Image (cartoon, rainbow, N blue to C red):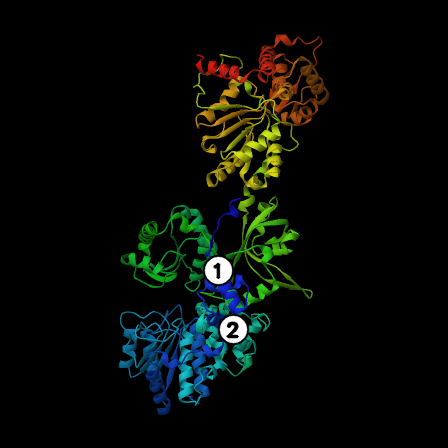
Amino acid sequence: MTALAETRWMIQPNDPERARVLAQAVGISPITAQLLLNRGITTPKAAQEFLYPSLSQLHSPYGLADMDRAVATIVAAMEAGLPITIYGDYDVDGTSSAALLINVFRRLGVSHVDYYIPHRIDEGYGLNEAAIYDLAQRGSKLLITVDCGVTAVEEVALAQRLGMQVVVTDHHQPGRELPAAEAVIDPHRSDCRYPFPHLAGVGVAFKLAQALLHTVGGAPDRWDEVGTEWLDLVALGTIADVASVHGENRAIIKYGLERMAASANLGIQALMEVARVTPETLSATTVSFGLAPRINAMGRMDDAGKVVEMLTTADYARAKEIAETLDEYNASRRSLEAEILQEAIALVEESKSYLTDKVLVVAKEGWHHGVIGIVASRLVERYYRPVIVVALEDGIGKGSARSIDGFDLFAALKECHEVLVGYGGHTMAAGISLRQDKLTELRQRINQVADQWLTPEDLIPRLLAEAEVALSDLSFRLVEELNLFAPFGPDNPPPVLTSRGVPLREVRAVGKEHRHLQLYFAPETGIRQGIAFGFGAMKEDLLHLSHVDIAYCPDINEFNGERSLQPKIKDIKIAQEYLRASLLSRISDRFQGLPESTAYDHVEAFGLLEGEGTPAPALSDCRWLDGRGENKGDYLRDVIGASANPLVIWVNRVGFACALADNIAAAFPGLSGGITVYSHQMEQSLQDECLCYHQELPWRVIVTDADQLPSSLLGPHPDLLVYHLPPSPYYLWHLAQQCQSRQGAVHLLFDEMDSTQARQLLAWSWPDADQLRRIYVELYRLCTVGVAEPLEELFLDIGPRLRLTRQGLLRALEVFVELGLCQFSETGLVLGEAPKNRLDLELSVRYNNVVQSRERMEKWIESASQRPMSLLRQMLAKLAEAV
């Protein structure tokens, strides 16, 4: 069942009263209101702005520091006819930023503008000296950076020495010193008072475009009307860069997607066509997983400048040609990524580092630098721990690192800076370079840091959920309200709800290779089914469960013109409320229909008469209560209803233990999750499961056929109810001794009827002469003389018909072996020729021992139910004193 318990659910605390007030003010459901509160949206005005974002939420570009200086510098270059170069990054954010400004300059009639996108492998991220020299030789006089440059102090100074002015637009964190450019626009500048610091690089470029259009193009002062025709490009870069989806970005993405669905940009049209994304299916998700990877593939595998060409061309055939190239590169990238991923997994598995290291470090010659970041992300998903993947070449390693929540990757690398040539990045992702001979030291150093910063619990994946609701609370209105939370992304994830104890009617594996699960719920939930993508391997774990806990995104499924509510399930757990009941059900299934072993099977290991047995302490600390002769059902109900102590109910066979536990669960529904069966005959896995659940929440009632329970299973002051007649006084002492060590009470419930039953059970385990003869006749009928017959088959055949336990049949066979009638082999029992004369059973020592043991037990049975409590206690006291 471990697959159902790997993820920690972190459910945000709810505030029902505040949610109710906000719900009434806005006219939404309390569940929707609670999810708004979870996002820090606490007022009706803020709720309206969030649910219904508007372009009026766009801020003035002049709120960004240096915007006026940037506009003045650019306008002067435009008027002077100076060559202008847009210098971008090779990812979606950088290329869409460059394309945006190219298109804006063309709108403004500027022809002396070009662009430069560095090669990822040959040049790396950001401004570099070789590129600056090249641009200077081309004659560029104004360099405008997009999505890079805020830390390029030396490179900007070089450009200025070579005769270029520089305007920096970026959204990354600045260093200690800003470049001495003509203007540095970055919302993260410490002196910047812009009200929304979370713009992507393309968002900052868009602000510059708005200011230029306003100053040069005579655009109106209403910023919701300036440059909005390019919001498709702005949304593309913002989504791909995983920028925070709230505030201004929320409006940009929402209206940018609407613009993209009917985009006039030929490059976007061609890209959507090759990615098979239609206006109807277009969303932040399809941009993230359909459009963006294709653009990024070009940057990883070739020259990303072609992306800018695609997004700025007026020739659809050329746009389509480039888009198809992007699609081919994406396919190649995926193939290469899969190959490297398998090699990386093999290295991890071979070294077993995932068992010892909190940070995984893998490296190999020949890995492509452009895809190792994706490989690192896949390894994080697989092993849920920080990962560094290093591509080695000529003794130098270039690596990409990805992290998990709670581990600041950049800070950790800072602690290891002595072994690195260089590093950079942020909390969750980083890049490094180092000498190959420093790899082992890096692994050791960063794991020393991780040992200090990460606990074992931090290495368990977390699922963040926003509220716990009944599945029946879902409605079309609620789902439609939650759909208003889109577009989704960082700081605004799709709402995840949880529902506990959902009754499960059926589970089916569906889809290609049965990779997914369809869960069918009971009618009372009001929801027919849910879909769990990627959970197909869990089918066997769920087949025998009656209830589950689910975490899911509420959704509406439309099929054949019909709409139905269908949760998209993110995780599944055994319903905690029914977890222990499920264990009881599985134990019952295990023993159903089998010939039962009884308490009499192995009783010869204990003393059978007064004075026999191992010395033992007296039971002076026990309270003894005599319930013999009373109605057992009434007595049980009274004790269960009145006692707060844990209860141990001893019965004489495990099949009856299962039945009694089921009856108690039915009579006391509130206890159904607190009742179990424990038996030494249970499989070890079931015993372990029983003990494990007890550690989390102690069992209230334990029904057992065992004479001794694990000490960890008994709580303080347990009540022992001896429901059936034990097979010997020593056996009774053994049961009671566990209670006396915890100052509990012993209730005797066995009666005359139990004496009759005890004699029957005794015969199942200790066959007499008549039974032995019948057994031999059956053996001769079933077995072929001289041929080994499997013992298990004999037991399953003879046992049920002659009412023999497995131990009872073995005792009979041992007598027959001693008499020379058969013999045991490695594969079973070999029957010999039938004797010519009548059997004399008394010639068998084993038979005589069986007879003596049975007589002793019969003597105990005759007197136990009638013997007064005082005499029973005297007998147990003598046992304790015996030597």
C-alpha distance separating marks 2 and 1: 24 Å
Residue 241, relative to residue 165: is it above or below?
Answer: above
State whether residue 446 is above or below residue 834. below
Q: Secondary structure at mark 1?
A: helix
Q: Nearer the viewer, residue 30 or 270?
A: 30
Residue 728 position by quadrant: top right
Residue furthest to the right in view is 781
**Which mark is on residue 17?**
1
Counting from the top left corner in percent of width and height, residue 705 is at 56, 27
Q: Tell me, yes or no, if residue 149 can be seen here.
A: yes
* Residue 567 point in image, percent of width and height: 58, 58
Q: From the viewer's perspective, is 35 left or right of 669?
A: left
Position of 507 with respect to 172 (left or right) is: right
Q: Which residue is mark 2?
A: 52
Which amino acid type corresponds to the residue marked 2 in the rendered image?
Tyr
Q: Amino acid at mark 1?
A: Glu
The numbered mark, 2 or 1, whose residue comes first in the sequence reads: 1
Which of discs 2 and 1 lies nearer the camera? The answer is: 1
Residue 555 against residue 172 in the figure, above or below: above
Q: Residues within 10 Å of mark 2 (few under 14, many from 20)?
A: few
Q: Position of residue 624 (x, y in %)?
A: 50, 23
Where's the C terminus, which quadrant? top left
Vertically, is 582 above or below 133? above
Task: Count numbered badges in the picture.
Answer: 2
Element under disc 2: loop
